[in-house]
Amino acid sequence: MRIPMTEYLIIDLDTERWNCRVCNQDLGEARGNYKEGTLVYDRDPTEIHQSILDPEKYEFTFAPDPTFCRILEFYCPGCGTQLETEYVPPGHPPTVDMLWDIDSLRETWAKRGTKPEVVINYGPGEEAVADFAPALGSHNTHNHSPHSFS
Amino acid sequence: MTLTANEPSTTGPAGDTSQPLTAQEQQWVDQFMDETTLFLGPDPAIMRSHQITSRSAYEDECISKGVDPIKVDRIRKRLAGALDEGYEMCEAMGAAPGAKWGDLTTAIYTAEGDVTYLSCHGVIAFSAILHHPIRYIMKYWKDEPTVGINPGDGFIHNDARYGNVHNTDQSMIMPIFREGKIIAWVAATIHEGENGACEPGGMPSGSETPFDDGLRMSPFKIVEKGELRRDLLTFLQHSVRDPKLQLADLKVKIGAVQRIQERVDSIIDEVGVETFVAALRVTVEDVEQEVKRRISELPDGTVSFNQFMDSTLKENILIKFACKVTVKGEKMTVDLRGTGPEILNRAINSPLCSVKSMMMQAILAFWWPDLPRCTSAMSPIDIISDEHTWADAGYDAPMGQSLQASFRGFSALQTAFAKMQFSNPEKFSNVLAPWFNQINTFLWGGLTQHGDQVGNLCADLNGMGGGAKAFRDGEDAVSPLFCAMADTAEQEVMEEEVPFMQLVSKRIVRDNQGFGKNSGGMGYEMIVAAEGTPMWGFMTVTSGSKFSSVTGMFGGYGCSTTPLAMVKGINIYDIIRKDSSKFDLSMERIMNEQPYEGGKYTTAHMGLQFDVAKDGEMYMIAQGSGGGYGDVLERDPEAVAKDLELGRISPKVATSIYGVVWDPETFVVDQEATTQLRHDSRQARIARGKPYKEFLEGYVKTEPPKDLLYYGSWGDDTEELTATHFTNNGPERVKATIDKLPLIMLPDRREVKISALEDRIRELELKHGEVVHRKS
């Protein structure tokens, strides 16, 4: 049984692994930190939140100060989807943002008796799937179900 | 030192082998202590508790006679109607700008002070806070011969140390009696604004001691048997900048509460006291049970979310707000340990009760908005917090701008819940990216064109951008996190009362967007300038100019930072009177083109202490955006092209962030080129991203950057807090648990600046061989 836990992450209760919902890439032990299975990039925040006021003239410009703030971008190594971002001071350890009780999760869903991938209808859309096709070297499927690749 | 009335009685220090006191002796000691208490300060036994009281014997008796759920529901609906009527009276007649925009609440409570029902409109946070003053009144004033509680009495308070969202809010709390017994309470609370603080408007960013925060009203009786006490009213009017407002809104609140009481009287006449009391109590208990059930439906586990605030409102620092939410069965625990220490000469600290009130705002407005707004909605949630952190500040810490900490409490719970509820098939609200969490607006004060002395603020703080949802973009400038139906008011109406204009009002700032598959609701800019007044000034009271105030969700990005910009030394009114073509204003254009000769163009962080505004000098700010949801490369390219066509985003953002290619003439998306660009962007991510463990080795440092004033735990696996302590020998970084940290105070920033300038002068003198003899 596979439980969608976030927009891009699923927990497979049979294998007890985190997987990417877009490409099914394995992201590590479901009882642990999914971030350990990701690729991480230390993004200068001024590249994302760009200056609106002239940075040559002013200290405060709408862009964060990179000596105060960094954006950690967590990518899926399989498809390059940006699974999560985190705003941190430079050098601050990333937060372990989710740790789930897998035994309890299994028990809860067994009791519910419904299919999680049917009843949880939030998830990545056509754009994620459409773009994944060229990465596979295949044609664009335009399939609305990201799980067709699993 | 804090003196409180409830120091536990003791039989002696630990290890004392003397005889324990007999019951009679203990009674004498207790009586002696009661009669000789020096000062009845905030009572920790009351203030640390957010749980409902246990059922009283009378409530039990009422409930035991049978509860008809249909009847309870009817009573509840009629109460909701009565409370909304009271709310509308306050909104329609209130003199405070806050009242006019809905920044208020009316509520009914059980006899013990648990909120049973709140008005459908207004600030939900009050449902977690107003039990404190009632419990205080019941504990200390009910049997106090010089006070007492009688029919027709009304109590007022504002000080958050006794339970309030913040000190600008003033309450009117009145009991309902039947047969000599208190059976319920009714209250109205309005964000009054002005409270005599060191700066106008009631939320001073510049307060450095608790005595700079203005009125310190512990709960006291100001209405006696239906009559407003003129002596106390005069004292309050004398203590604030706006005596007319102080009187007007006291009358409005008394009127609203009395109207609600009339409605309650008719309900009781109809159903009887016992059914009424049972209905109040059953509502509170039912909500608690339902909250437990909803918690038990969430997956067991822990969600953590750290926030970093970049300002004391006087200087830029980084201070952490740590939060771990753990669900186990029907129990939820919110752990705030790791949060930075209180700063004893800055305004950003908050009492824990105010932080909890904003957590309640997240719970009842963003998690389970269908529940009656009861104190019990938070009862099943344990909150672990260290006293003397900035989110759980002590009695001696200034709290003038406590929203800085309390709003982080909101964001902690609102943000974490997206992860907690995502996999739950039973949802009561959307999965949502963070709501913007700063009250970016202008506070103002001085003499009006009518000669009145005033101090208050612009309603534009209510134009916060909403967080992106799982299925759609967040709404632009939709509402403040604390009040879904608050209004941004009619600026033109305000301009009849105050001597300034919003030269630019509610214009979306291009690129000020939380980028994502679904984008965060955008914020707008406002430009103000005063004219025709002998004395006027503006303030801003927020953070987020160096570190984004809210993050994104599930791969989306957070908000931009927001600066304060000013043009001083010009009179924009003279300029546009001479040449109306110059009235083409935007912060971006004015600051980048600097079109007004002789103007001094500056930017600053958003903590501006009261700044005297000469005629026509311009002050410019922007509201922030809600967080974005999902990967930017998943955003519908047509939505990107539409934003581009409307000028909401720049071509640079469309290309570099969203990976969209379009025809600049027609704004038609080139689908093929977009697919290729997005594919290339994903490949670039895979190429530049490092495996997690390898990344940590290069990135994580054992402590914050040397020159950064950082406060809070560094990483989440430590009990120690890092802080910079200013000693005789200058700044010194310390690391210790909260109980062992030195008192944290920051130096006067002007002295720091002067000292740096003096050093520079000496350096230049040395360089140029100039000898200057100075006397100390």
Image: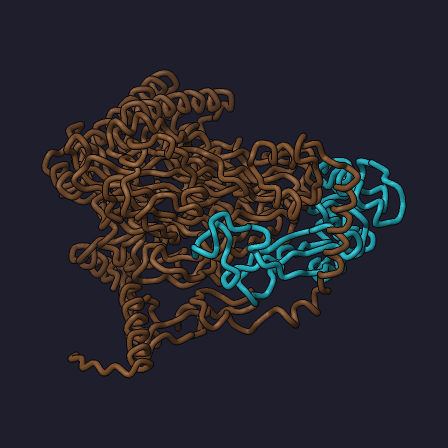
Chain colours: A cyan, B brown
Front in this rendered view, residue B735 or B645: B645
Is residue B215 found left or right of B409 in the rendered image? Answer: left
Q: Is residue B54 visible?
A: no
Q: Is residue A52 visible?
A: yes
Quadrant location of residue B245? top left
Say which residue appears at 27% left-offset and 58% top-offset: B208
Say which residue appears at 32% left-offset and 28% top-offset: B100
Quadrant location of residue B446? top left
Residue farthest along the right direction in this orientation: A138
Front in this rendered view, residue B247 or B512: B512
Q: Is residue A142 above or below residue B317?
A: above
- Percent x, y of residue B250: 22, 31
Residue farthest along the left direction in this orientation: B231
Q: Is residue B229 above or below residue B395?
A: above
Quadrant location of residue B11? bottom left
- Percent x, y of residue B436: 49, 43
Front in this rendered view, residue A12 or B267: A12
Q: How many marks?
A: 0
Is residue B257 found left or right of B275 in the rendered image? Answer: left
Say which residue appears at 41% left-offset and 36% top-offset: B585
Front in this rendered view, residue B688 or B380: B688
- Percent x, y of residue A62: 48, 49
Is residue B196 found left or right of A41 in the rendered image? Answer: left
